[in-house]
Amino acid sequence: MKGRVLSFYTQQNQGAILGEDGRQYSFMGTHWQEQVAPREDDQVEFAVDATGQVTNITYDTTATSAINLDKPQQSAQPQYATGHSHTTQEQPTLDNVYASPTSQVSPSPTYNSAQDALYAEEEGYNMIDWTKKCMSNYVNFNGRARRKEYWFFYLAQILISMAIGAVLGIISGAIGTDLTMMSNLVGLIFLLPTLAVGSRRLHDIGKSGWWQLLWLVPIIGWILLIVWFATDTTPEVNQWGAPARRV
């Protein structure tokens, strides 16, 4: 698959790619196959394994604006009588970026224009938009999701179930046959995207999606999950990518 690098944080050795399918993928520096460290807007090709993890990331050599592995070019420097010349900053590579624990980049996330545009767009989302996003990420258990994405999708399910239940009740009364059990099909349709957005929501506060198994623990498990789903985005970049909203 082809895509574009949205960000790369050298201290965390993690970054994000916007794929040609419109999805944002997080990746680790260990899966970067080039010698030069990735930069914003680099055009790349990558693979996605069976678990949804990005692997084998390389430059897209077929991109219209080809990547120059040596950029930025060092321009010719004026020579002075002393024989010394001005020096330019060395282009970071995967060999020297992690040479010491004190990197050039602070651990706090920084945002580029592509991320800012995505954050700004999602600020105007309504319940329908969030529902569309969740359904388009039907079985995407990777990445992160903000509170609005999870709770608006949950509200949409309730409203849709109520509407279908009401319609089936009216039809049942008209034909004399109970059809209300068919409303259970709605729950089955929404099951996978609900688990997927639940995992992304937990990722957004730094927790594994497997914590959703607490739904099997009545009362205590339910309360704990509800509190976590209502917890605000954590600002740190984690193994699932950049924060789901600007923080």
Image: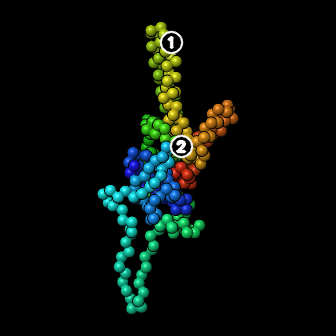
N-term mark: 2 or 1: 1
In screen coordinates, is 219 left or right of 92? Answer: right
Cα distance, mark 2 to mark 1?
Answer: 37 Å
Which residue is tagged 2?
Answer: 200
Q: In the rendering, at what x and y percent does residue 44 appear?
A: 40, 55
In screen coordinates, is 63 left or right of 127? Answer: left
Q: In the rendering, at what x and y percent does residue 234 appear?
A: 57, 50
Three-letter residue code for mark 1: Asp
Which residue shows up at 60% across the image and 40% down it? Answer: 210
Q: Which of the colour schemes (rainbow, by chain, secondary structure, one colour) is used? A: rainbow
SS at mark 2 in the image: helix
Q: In the rendering, at what x and y percent does residue 88 appear?
A: 43, 76
Which residue shows up at 48% across the image and 29% down it? Answer: 189
Which residue is tagged 1?
Answer: 178
Three-letter residue code for mark 2: Arg
Label 1 CA crowd tier, 10 Å (few <14, some 14–19, many 20+): some
Q: In the rendering, at what x and y percent does residue 138 appear?
A: 47, 37
In screen coordinates, is 223 left or right of 122? Answer: right
